[in-house]
């Protein structure tokens, strides 16, 4: 079972790396394995429940906010 910190690293990497995001959503265990983490069944199911379009939109908003000279306004924060 991955720890909360490990899950946060997986999500963070997926937000900034489109290829990793695709892998995480298609094969959560393989993506976790790239960081030498092991997910339990409930963690895999929760990740599989994420809508890919929503994940892409969130990532795009984050990248845009980080690129803004003023830090931008991330709507979900």
Image (cartoon, rainbow, N blue to C red):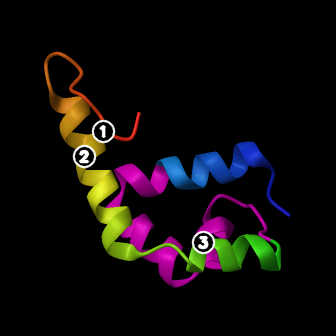
Residue 34 location (% of width, % of height): 61, 65
Q: Nearer the viewer, residue 22 or 74?
A: 74
Measured as percent of width and height from the top left, residue 9 is found at 60, 47
Mark 3 and 1 residues: CB-CB less than 8 Å, in contact? no
Callout count: 3
| Residue identified by numbered label 2 | 61
Residue 47 circle label: 3
Which of pointers 2 and 1 indicates the residue nearer the eye? 1
Circle 2 residues within 10 Å: few <14, some 14–19, many ≥20:
some
Q: In the orientation shown, which residue stands out farthest toward the left?
A: 69
Which residues make up the magenta segment? 13-39
Question: What is the number of the mark on residue 75?
Answer: 1
Does the CB distance between marks 2 and 1 fall below 8 Å?
yes
Disc 2 versus disc 3: distance between alpha carbons?
20 Å
Main secondary structure along the magenta-highlighted residues: helix
Instruction: State the residue at coordinates (72%, 61%).
Output: 36
Cα distance between the residues tagged 3 and 1: 22 Å
In the rendered view, would you say 7 is above or below 24? above
- Looking at this view, name the residue that lies furthest to the top: 70
Is tag 2's residue or tag 1's residue first in the polypeptide sequence? 2
Mark 3 surroundings: few (<14), some (14-19) or many (≥20) residues within 10 A: some
Asked which secondary structure carries label 2, the reply is helix
Q: Nearer the viewer, residue 28 or 70?
A: 70
Which image quadrant is residue 39 in?
bottom right
Q: Which mark is residue 7?
A: none
The crowd level at tag 1 (other Cα within 10 Å; few <14, some 14-19, many 20+) is few
Q: Percent position (x, y) of residue 5?
A: 72, 42
Instruction: Please determine whether, in this image, residue 68 is positioned above or below residue 2.
Output: above
Mark 3 or mark 1, earlier in chain: 3
């Amino acid at each position: 079972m991955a720890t909360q910190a490990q899950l946060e690293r997986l999500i963070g990497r997926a937000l900034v790396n489109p290829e990793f995001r695709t892998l995480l959503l298609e094969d959560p265990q393989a993506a976790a394995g790239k960081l030498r983490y092991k997910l339990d069944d409930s963690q895999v199911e929760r990740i599989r429940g994420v809508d890919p379009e929503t994940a892409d939109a969130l990532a795009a908003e984050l990248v845009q906010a980080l690129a803004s000279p003023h830090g931008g306004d991330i709507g979900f924060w």
